[in-house]
Image: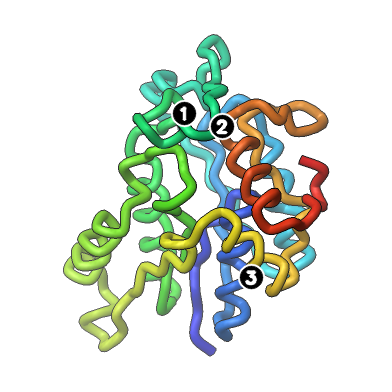
Amino acid sequence: MKKAVVLFSGGLDSSTCLAWALSKGYECFALSFFYGQRHNKENKAAKKIADIMKVPLFNINLSFPWLKCCSLVDKKMKLPENKIEKISKEIPSTYVPGRNLVFTSIGVSFADAIGADAVVLGPNAVDYSGYPDCRPQFYKALNKAVNLGTKNPSLGRRIKILTPIINLSKAEIIKLAFKLKVPLQYTWSCYKGGKKPCGVCDSCKLRAAGFQKTGFRDPAGN
């Protein structure tokens, strides 16, 4: 069976990507990360969903002090609460420097070690918060570099970086999630770490707008 390493936060997007990879016949290995973010709700969600999907989950702890420049890490910084039409107009304070590059590199290391065929992750370039590391051209260039610097290609196995939702709207992602029977009630998208989603941060607003466009009720109560 072909193998895939899936970068997995327990959110709507990455949960949909995990379900997508399983539907494509991959034996999946999920990776979640804790890098000092202000809450661990998403990591708990990742564990719950991985258990439901019967996928092994590996937790990676990173300690990068310089990430304090990001409001997802520094609790003293204010999280953005933009109007929906202003989201993605500029790079917000929630941008974590090089996060997707670091995470993908760790996923590639795992894939190279176990002979996996793919690294699957959920960046999105349509309904998103303006992050530069969510653009298709970034992953196209990165995939080329990966296959110049890993063992697998010399053995006849190229590692593919797969970004199945990168060109989908949030509404399209939600429809795909329902089609793939993602346990959406356990996913966590909110930037804050309370008992319930805040409903006012950029991530909550993007999720809510997506559900509104589909006409579906959000099983997570967002």
- Residue type of the residue flagged with mark 3: Ala
Res 13 quadrant in image: bottom right
User: Dot 2: within a 10 Å radius of its alpha carbon, few (fewer than 14), some, or many (20 or more) residues?
Assistant: many
Observer able to see residue 67: yes
Q: Mark number for residue 19?
A: 3
Observer able to see residue 115: no
Tell me whether the residue at label 2 lies in contact with that at label 3, contact meaning CB atoms closer than 8 angstroms.
no
Q: Horizontal placement of 60 versus 193: left or right?
A: left
* Residue at image point 38% right, 38% down: 130
Q: Horizontal placement of 172 versus 44: left or right?
A: left
Label 1 vs 3, first from the N-terminus: 3
User: Dot 1: within a 10 Å radius of its alpha carbon, few (fewer than 14), some, or many (20 or more) residues?
Assistant: many
* Residue at image point 73% right, 44% down: 44
Percent position of residue 180, x then y: 69, 73
- Residue type of the residue flagged with mark 2: Asp
126 above or below 86?
Answer: below
Q: Which residue is mark 2?
A: 202
Label 2 vs 3, first from the N-terminus: 3
Regarding mark 2 in the picture, which secondary structure is present there? helix
- Residue type of the residue flagged with mark 1: Thr
* Residue at image point 54% right, 14% down: 78
Percent position of residue 7, x then y: 51, 57
Tell me whether the residue at label 1 lies in contact with that at label 2, contact meaning CB atoms closer than 8 angstroms.
yes
Regarding mark 3 in the picture, which secondary structure is present there? helix
- Residue lying furthest top in this view? 76
How far, Cα to Cα, is label 2 from label 3? 25 Å
Q: Which residue is mark 1?
A: 94
Percent position of residue 27, x then y: 58, 79
Label 1 vs 2, first from the N-terminus: 1
* Residue at image point 80% right, 32% down: 196
Q: Horizontal placement of 5 versus 15: left or right?
A: left
